[in-house]
């Protein structure tokens, strides 16, 4: 009887095959993902013709006293968490009355009990404010904090009180809000364009929009009155245009004309069956009441 030959290579190969088979049957470790302690956020807002974008991280109080304690008064703060907060403006703006060129900046602050310093530097790639250098500041302005009745848990930056040429940039957390006045240029940009279109041979002109813009920005009210009349001539049944004419006349000081025009608008609206009827009736009645 012959003894089987021992073949080490064959044994090793068999072991590798078995090991590989077992490995193939072992599921991979799950890929873990944890909630961010300070989630990233992006805010986009247009004010006038200016596009604003803010990228920042939002820490929470989580039972802590942060600004004035963990982030002491008088010390530069990244104004958020993680990387320094970034803010960009598509056009030149004013912050607290100070001029700032279009561009992207890092936003830092120096919190104070009664006054904050708002700082903007040309954007780099800073983590926190550890490499902050005052000599790199582009702009510094002061702002007063406002006390809040109800605490805000998560640090928030918002843009509110939006008008054609202004808004408020708010830094909000805990029991305070720091408002920063933001101004943009609209009139000097739009008025030459309006005048050019109105002086052109264009078949369709924005009479109503131009009239309301001039009214709202205290520009040439005689032009505004002429343009609203032209808009009404194009749409004689548009009682909402009569309401806007009444407002222009009121601003020109012609109270009797404004009241008569508002009443005409109400009479025309009474014949309408659409949802705007009640709205413009109320608006005209409120205008009449304010002129008496």
Image (cartoon, grey):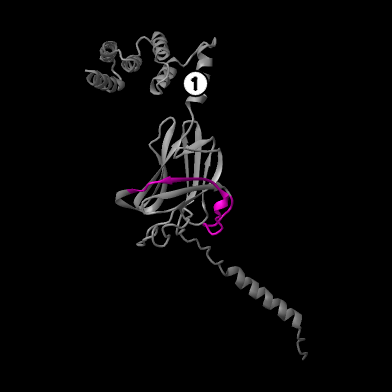
Task: Count the numbered circles shown.
Answer: 1
Question: Residue at 41% of width from left, 15% of height from top?
Answer: 224
Position of residue 96 relative to residue 155, above or below, is above
Label 1 belongs to which residue? 191
Q: Position of residue 74 (x, y in %)?
A: 43, 57
Q: Position of residue 256 (x, y in %)?
A: 26, 11
Say whether residue 129 is magenta: yes
Binning the other alpha carbons within 10 Å of mark 1 as few (below 14), some (14 to 19) or many (20 upward) gives some
Say whether residue 103 is magenta: no
Q: Position of residue 47 (x, y in %)?
A: 46, 34
**Could you say which is closer to the camera, residue 204 or residue 12?**
204
**Could you say which is closer to the camera, residue 222 or residue 87?**
222
The magenta stretch is 124-146
Q: Quadrant of residue 101?
A: top right
**Could you say which is closer to the camera, residue 259 or residue 221?**
221
Question: Residue at 46% of width from left, 51% of height from top?
Answer: 109
- Residue that sits furthest to the bottom in the current view: 1
Position of residue 179 relative to residue 202, above or below, is below
Q: Is residue 197 left or right of residue 284?
A: right
Q: Is residue 244 left or right of residue 126?
A: left
Q: Position of residue 114 (x, y in %)?
A: 36, 51
Position of residue 35 relative to residue 282, above or below, is below
Q: Quadrant of residue 240?
A: top left
Identify the secondary structure beneath mark 1: helix
Question: Residue at 50% of width from left, 39% of height from top?
Answer: 52
Position of the C terminus, as image quadrant, is: top left
Q: Is residue 83 left or right of residue 280?
A: right
Position of the N terminus, as image quadrant, is: bottom right
Position of residue 23 relative to residue 54, above or below, is below
């Amino acid at each position: 009887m012959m003894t089987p030959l021992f073949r080490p290579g064959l044994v090793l190969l068999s072991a590798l095959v078995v090991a590989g088979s077992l490995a193939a049957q072992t599921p991979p470790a799950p890929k873990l993902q944890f909630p961010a302690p300070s989630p990233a956020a992006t805010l986009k807002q247009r004010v006038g013709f200016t596009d604003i974008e803010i990228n920042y991280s939002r820490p929470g109080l989580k039972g802590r006293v942060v600004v004035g304690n963990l982030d002491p008064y008088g010390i530069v703060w990244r104004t958020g968490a993680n990387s320094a907060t970034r803010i960009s403006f598509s056009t030149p703006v004013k912050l607290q009355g100070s001029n700032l060129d279009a561009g992207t900046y890092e936003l830092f602050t120096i919190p104070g009990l009664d006054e904050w310093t708002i700082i903007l530097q040309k954007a780099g790639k800073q983590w926190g404010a550890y490499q902050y250098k005052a000599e790199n500041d582009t702009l510094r302005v002061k702002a007063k904090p406002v006390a809040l009745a109800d605490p805000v848990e998560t640090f928030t930056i918002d843009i509110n009180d939006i008008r054609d040429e202004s808004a408020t940039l708010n830094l909000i957390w805990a029991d305070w809000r720091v408002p920063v006045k933001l101004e943009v240029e609209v009139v000097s940009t739009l008025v030459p364009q309006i005048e050019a279109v109105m002086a052109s041979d264009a078949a369709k002109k924005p009479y109503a929009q131009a009239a309301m813009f001039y009214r709202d920005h205290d520009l040439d009210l005689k032009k505004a009155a002429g343009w609203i009349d032209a808009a009404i001539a194009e749409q004689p049944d548009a009682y909402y245009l009569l309401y806007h004419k009444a407002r222009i006349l009121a601003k020109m000081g012609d109270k009797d004309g404004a009241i008569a025009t508002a009443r005409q608008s109400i009479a025309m609206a009474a014949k309408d069956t659409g949802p705007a009827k009640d709205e413009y009736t109320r608006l005209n009645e409120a205008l009449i009441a304010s002129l008496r």
